[in-house]
Image: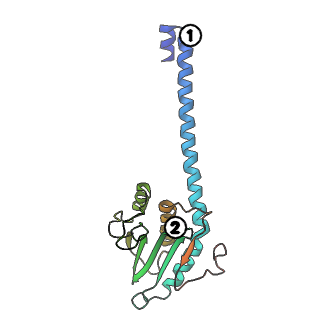
Amino acid sequence: MIMRHWLLFGPQACRKLWAAMFATGLALAITLAQTGYSRAQDATSLERFLIKYRCPVVNRLERIYARRDPIAHRDEYLILYVPRHQEHYVQCLFYAPGKIYCEAASGFFFDSPGHPRTMRLPPDAIAALGRLGFSTDDSKGNFKIYLDIVSPPEFNAIADLMLKALYDGFGARAETKLGFKAPYARHGTSKCSLVS
């Protein structure tokens, strides 16, 4: 193509075409590099978040599951929340043998019954929760997912589901201090020293 332009339009036109192609290629390369860098940076951010909180979540899930009687103990649950925004939470409940039910807050219960709803998640957060497997209908409650679990459960997978929901749905990051509520695992153990 350059040679044809050289023959048809002369060296001046050819240099201009070469400069334009180079500038376009350079701009495209910079854009692709920035996009890749942003994705890599985001993946690193998620990895740091999971590394910081996976152990304390797994530790609590293991201790809750050890009760082994969800029918008799209806409070075999774990809630992870952002203390500064307690309406941003994810909770999971061992509700029957081999079953777990998880919810991500939708804002449905934020206001008192009978009052107009004032809190909703943005569409991109709802879509992110949907990609994790949560329902995306918040017309009657929170976003939910029912899962069958093996015995013993894949605690890392459950922890990652909860943490990714907080990360993608509510913007929690490694720098975010998380709160934990669990009747059968109120406090962290020395096994996981990063978070109590």
Residue 119 at x, y = what percent? 42, 63
Q: How many marks?
A: 2
Judged from the image, the secondary structure of the residue bearing numbered disc 2 is helix
Secondary structure, mark 1, is helix
Give whichever of 112, 59 is nearer the camera: 112
**Residue, disc 1:** 12
Residue drawn 50% across the image and 62% down it = 170
Which residue is painted at 40% across and 73% down in the image? 112
What amino acid type should be assigned to the residue bearing mark 1?
A: Gln
Please provide percent x and percent y for residue 68: 46, 88
Residue carrying label 2: 163
Callouts 2 and 1 close, C-beta under 8 Å: no
The answer to whether 45 is drawn above or below residue 180 in the figure is: above
Residue in the foreground of this view, choosing between 163 and 152 = 163
Query: Quadrant of residue 125 in the image?
Result: bottom left
Residue visible at 42% across and 87% down?
Answer: 74
Q: 63 left or right of 130?
A: right
Q: At x 52% / y 85%, what residue is drawn?
A: 183
> Label 2 is placed on what type of residue?
Leu
Q: Quadrant of residue 190?
A: bottom right
